[in-house]
Amino acid sequence: MRRTEVSIDLAALRHNLQTLREAAPSSRIMAAIKANGYGHGLQRVAHTLNNVDALGVACVEEAITLREAGITTPITLLEGFFHADELPLITRHGLEMVIHHARQIDILEQQSLSTTLRVWLKVDTGMHRLGVPAEGARLQWQRLSAITNIEVIGLMTHLANADDLSDPKTEQQLALFADCCGDLPGERTIANSAALLGWPESHADWNRPGISLYGVSPFLNGRGEQHNLRPVMTLRSELIAINQLKKGDAIGYGGSWHCPEDMAVGVVAVGYGDGYPRHAQSGTPVLISGKRVSLIGRVSMDMITVDLRGLPDARVGDEVVLWGEGLPVEEIAEYASTIPYELLCGVTGRVQIVEKGK
Ligand SMILES: *Cc1c(COP(=O)(O)O)cnc(C)c1O
């Protein structure tokens, strides 16, 4: 059997939730678990975080999957409804949702809701993606509040640049949010992971961490361990061949990497067909039996090649870690010119999943 697997460390997930609670002790936590729990398994993450205050997902399908799996934690649809025909499902499953656009309010005004629907109003303070314009927030809040059976939980905004602690935009967004809705009643929620860990002034009734729950730093060039976070996902495989090659031999498709001397090259059973990034450069670290070696040549669909000059004792069958325990996914993302979020979400269905730390 091909031994390419991800292990999901449930104890690390629980530890990270506790770390985030301690970092913002007066706030409740809405855990962002959209996109299959950032690739860790939607139900698995929800069951493990059974003591979190709420869960945030991207769509009603994700929410219903959770309800059908017996999850009773409050669930918020972070983008609200896309089409009016979702509303009966949303009320039936008792989902809460974010209203981000006047068009959604138009639709709600035309419905007759049979039971109470709890909603957040999202305000655009500078992200310029979702949210009603800050200057119109009061008007939209009044419209929503006037609808029978709509209960406005409170106000929400999302920060665009909180991952950069030197960027003045975060303070501008916080000031605009306070300014446009300071005296409106209800709860407030602002912070993603970066704001929770780096901008204490953004802490509100609720914070909404995602990536940090999975043990990953939200900051540019950051590492989870700097914040007492532990990696939840580890991607592993094994060494399936070791070849003694000659000086000048070209490795893999396109032959872009040439052996600078006679040397051993290892082949590892992982590739972009598993979610390992095709754009990882030569030099990307790979951990074999706990020691770092370098990726060389192009990433194939099912395999990568590694420089074994520093590892004379390497044997076929040795365990290989691509990211996770001992090798931060943040570092792999830098070598692949992407972000850890994309790597975690991108592990494909053929990779076996094992759980630890139950
Ligand atoms: C995904 C998401 C978050 C979590 O962001 P992280 O950077 O992963 O902490 C917070 N708020 C909203 C609205 C989101 O969609």
Image: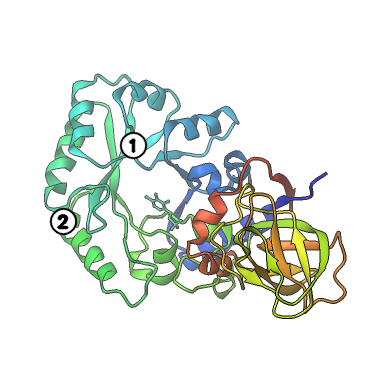
* Rendered view: 264 above or below 25: below
Which residue carries the number 2 mark?
A: 180
* Rendered view: 289 above or below 57: below
| Residue at mark 1: C-beta within 8 A of ligand 1 | no
**Considering the numbered disc 1 on the image, is that residue within a helix, a strand or a loop?**
loop
**Observer able to see residue 358:** no
The tag earlier along the polypeptide, 1 or 2, is 1
* Rendered view: 45 above or below 108: below
**Kind of residue indicated by mark 2:** Cys
Q: CA distance from mark 1 to mark 2?
A: 22 Å
**Kind of residue indicated by mark 1:** Gly
Q: Nearer the viewer, mark 1 or mark 2?
A: 1
Q: Nearer the viewer, residue 30 or 321?
A: 321
The residue at 41%/23% (across/down) is 89
With 128 as the anchor, is 221 left or right in this view? right
Quadrant (top left, top right, bottom left, bottom right) of the N terminus: top right
* Residue 322 found in image quarter: bottom right
Q: Residues within 10 Å of mark 2 (few under 14, many from 20)?
A: some
Q: Residues within 10 Å of mark 1 (few under 14, many from 20)?
A: many
| Residue at mark 2: C-beta within 8 A of ligand 1 | no
Tell me where residue 82 appears, x and y as whole percent. Answer: 32, 31
Tell me where residue 233 appears, x and y as whole percent. Answer: 64, 56
* Residue 77 found in image quarter: top left
* Residue 288 found in image quarter: bottom right
Which residue carries the number 1 mark?
A: 80
The residue at 48%/61% (across/down) is 339
With 117 as the anchor, is 194 left or right in this view? right
Tell me where residue 88 appears, x and y as whole percent. Answer: 37, 21
